[in-house]
Image (spheres, grey):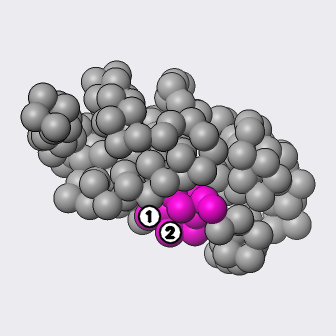
Amino acid sequence: MQFEAAQNYILLRLHKELPPYLTYHNIGHVMDVCRATERIAIAEKISPYEISLLLTAAAYHDSGFIISDKDHEANACLIAAETLPQFEYTPAEIDLINAMIRSTAIPQKPQNRLEEIICDADLDYLGRDDFFPIGHTLFNELKHFGVLKTELEWNLLQVRFLEQHHYFTATAIKNRKQKKEQHLLHIKQILQHP
């Protein structure tokens, strides 16, 4: 498994091929998820081999946006299945990576520890200080797709999402849950006093 070569390959493709209107699902988000994945995996005492699989999944998880904004997880799995064999990944490793990619679909339904880690990494920002600026990039992207139009709609969507979301790993619960709850409270206050 040539992990670094595979990661460099997909990051370069994302940099070149993702459309500019993806203000959230872009190379910055993928790099952020890779960093969060590694941090959580180390804290959760995951083996170096499994960390390589996790980081491959993190690098590939939104690559499906190269093909289409619809079913991007399924398309990411196609790209992984098509390209990872050239980096000496086995069919079994690709199956594990694709299961991790699929687990990031909303609503998240991870089936094992590795899937829990990538799910928590994908939404790590929900419990961080940069929640609002990152959220604004998602708001702009959703406006582009016509999913919503106003900040009021966005704040209502965020309240629903934050109320339904929960972290899975002990690391994310310890490090991100409290701040996420503070963000939820802040948005509710904005809605009460527009």
> Where 32 sits versus 146, above or below?
below
**Residue indicated by mark 1:** 32
Q: Secondary structure at mark 2?
A: helix
Q: Is 41 displayed left or right of 142 in the figure?
A: left
Q: Residue at x 65, y 68 (%)?
A: 20
Tell me: 148 left or right of 7. Answer: left
Front residue of 145/131: it is 145
Residue 23 on the magenta span: yes
Mark 2 crowdedness (10 Å alpha carbons): few <14, some 14-19, many ≥20: few
Q: Quadrant of residue 74?
A: top right
Say which quadrant the C terminus sits in: top left
Label 2 belongs to which residue? Answer: 28
Disc 1, SS: helix
- Horizontal arrangement in the rendering, residue 192 relative to residue 48 (left or right): left
Disc count in the image? 2
Where does the magenta region start and end? Answer: 21-33
Which residue corresponds to the image point at 63% horizontal and 62% vertical from the top-left?
Answer: 21
Looking at the rendered structure, the kind of residue marked 1 is Asp
The vertical placement of 25 against 112, above or below, is below
Query: Amino acid type of disc 2?
Result: Gly
Please say if the residues under marks 2 and 1 sit with CB atoms less than 8 Å apart: yes
